[in-house]
Amino acid sequence: MNASFPRLLAGLLLLGSSLTLPAADWQPLFNGRDLHGWKTLGGTAPFTVQDGIIVGTTVSGTTNSFLATTESYGDFILELEVKQEGGPSNSGVQFRSESLADYQNGRVHGYQLEIDPSERAWTGGIYDEARRGWLYPGTLNPAARDAYRLGEWNRIRIEAIGPEIRTWVNGVSVTHVIDALTPRGFLALQVHSINDPAEAGRRVLWRNLRIQTTGLVPSPAAGIPVRNLIPNNVSTAEKAAGWRLLWDGRTTAGWRGARMDRFPKNGWKIADGELVVLESGGGESKKGGDIVTEQEFSAFELQLDFKLTKGANSGIKYFVREEVTPIGGSAIGLEYQLLDDENHPDAKLGLPGTRTLASLYDLIAKQGTLKGLGVRPVIGEWQHARLVVHPDNRVEHWLNGIKVVDYVRGSSDFLAHVAVSKYKDIAGFGLAPQGRLLLQDHGNEVHFRSIKIRSLP
């Protein structure tokens, strides 16, 4: 055998392993010579072709600029390479996006794979440009935040097959989103606006853009967290990870009134896949009261969507005890606070911040800030709550993909918080080995959906 043959065979195998599909199945999106098949939208940052590469350059005094395909795409697999020169600048790759005259005067909107060379390092995350903000921030999969390399060529992959949207950066699985809001739209390369004139002249370079639209074969499951935005739906990947619906979206099955043997006859309604606590106007006779799960839980992960009305107060309680306590009122348990911080007076009561949205009610204020992250809570819009209780008693509160509370049940710090709270006279508060989950009726209209849970080993 020729001595060079093993090296040739090894090279062919290496080449084959880098291609998910045969080269014949891919179609180029860029001819390497000019911008035929593309058009500019939005701002005035220039896009040029240099040495077979698309180059976008930041300029002052303009909004986000996009180089968009003239063709629209539904289901596809897209691959490309991107590099930044002259300093870091925010960028992205739009897909299933639109520019409509009746939507914000033609503003580009839709899904975007983020290119984020900042310290935040959310490259590969999915942002809903000019609509809902972050769908999958980098905080949900921190192991992927080091995948992007500033100043080098980076391989980007997007799979959009039906409602399943997944992204990769340099072979690292970054996101897994399930969403059906926009099934089809154009692709676009973004040059982000800049606030500092000193950042003008920074360049974003793209090459080797190719797409497949037929015979699509999704990549194997990567085992990363899934963000499912289809109401009351559990995807195949979620089921494999142990998730199930805690509320079926149609009936009262699995729930009953707190300290009751049935679901409340009034005060709650089920409509259009939503579980709604109704406004009582301060009238106790109109309230249905809190509802609890029939099942008890110990170590678990819970997530749900909620929508607050103006001035609303509610909560998600866990490790709930239904016996009457010295402080009376609602069944006792640790509480993920749901509140319109701007318009409800409870936000300013207790120790600073301990009664605000997503805090551990009356005990621990949420940490950090959501300002400027594109994940801020908006009253009247759907928000996402995530609650994780680990087997070692570490507890996490998440709001819209950002962890805002982290504590350990039974720790000296936890007990110190309890000692100065409204629960100080309740023996063993928050320390039950298991308990029910509770949705609170505080007399205000609040909507819930997509209530899911999985047990943690």
Image (tube, rainbow, N blue to C red):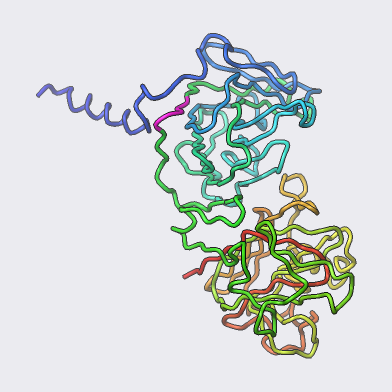
Most distant residue in the left direction: 1
Indicate the position of residue 202 as horizontal and vertical percent values.
Answer: 67, 23
Whether residue 93 appears in this view of the structure is no
Indicate the position of residue 94 as horizontal and vertical percent values.
Answer: 61, 31
Most distant residue in the top direction: 33
Which residue is rendered at x = 85% and y = 78% of the image?
284
Q: Between 15 and 234, which is closer to the camera in this rendering?
A: 234
Q: Is 311 displayed left or right of 401 in the figure? A: right
Indicate the position of residue 167 as horizontal and vertical percent values.
Answer: 52, 39
Q: Is 346 displayed left or right of 181 in the figure? A: right
Q: Give the quadrant of residue 127.
A: top right
Q: Is residue 180 magenta?
A: no
Judged by its main secondary structure, the magenta piece is loop
Q: Give the quadrant of residue 100.
A: top right
Image vertical order of residue 104 relative to residue 179, above or below: above
Q: Is 201 displayed left or right of 13 in the figure? A: right
Image vertical order of residue 75 relative to residue 455, above or below: above
Quadrant containing the N terminus is top left
Q: Between 148 and 294, which is closer to the camera in this rendering?
A: 294
* Image mark count: 0
Image vertical order of residue 41 relative to residue 124, above or below: above
Which residue is rendered at x = 64% and y = 31% of the image?
97
Whether residue 46 appears in this view of the structure is yes
Q: Between 425 and 453, which is closer to the camera in this rendering?
A: 453
Q: Which segment is the magenta one?
A: 211-215
